[in-house]
Image (cartoon, grey):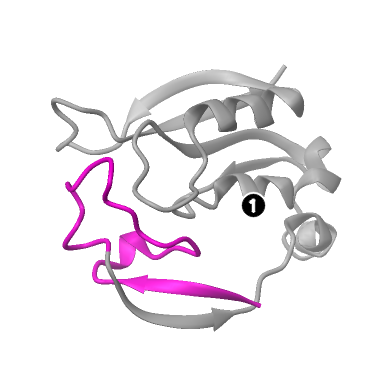
Amino acid sequence: MLVLNIMESSVFNSFLEPDDSETEQFQGENRVVERVEVQVKRLDQMMQGLKDEYGFKNVFLKLDTQGFDLDVFEGCSGCLDSIRGVQTEVSVMSIYQNMPTFGDSLALFKANGFEVSGLYPISELRFPHAVEFDCIYLPR
């Protein structure tokens, strides 16, 4: 079980605490209004059951867990051979406490045999400073 922070705007719900020290852009929306315990499972423990139920062989993994993407990816370590691509958010400005940086993401994916295929800005309000990008990683 983990505690999920429910934020003013649900797009910011996260296991991490908000942090507006690098940017105040989301300060009103990214604030905790409630905390709930949720059950969490590793994807590599569920993958075979999902394959059996839905009949797929290859996976494109879309991660959007508000600062928790690298933890989720680490939960895939036992099924990386099924993953043909990953889309994850990478941060250049933290909006949560202890959230990984783009460098952290790059190092973890490279260590697991993935390389960057593309970077795409997320927010229309990014100018003049980028906060996050969607990053596509593909196996080498």
**Which quarter of the picture shows residue 73?**
top right
Between 81 and 132, the one nearer to me in the picture: 132
Q: Quadrant location of the C terminus?
A: top right
Residue 77 in percent (x, y) is at 80, 44
x 84%, y 58%: residue: 48
SS of the residue at dot 1?
A: helix
Q: Which residue is mark 1?
A: 72
Residue 62, magenta (yes or no): no
- Is residue 21 rendered to the left or right of residue 137? left
Q: Quadrant location of the N terminus?
A: bottom right
Main secondary structure along the magenta-highlighted residues? loop
x 17%, y 47%: residue: 25
x 34%, y 48%: residue: 95
Q: Residue furthest front?
A: 21
- Is residue 69 rendered to the left or right of residue 47? left
**Highlighted magenta segment, given as a residue range:** 1-30
Between 129 and 88, the one nearer to me in the picture: 129
- Is residue 115 rendered to the left or right of residue 11? right
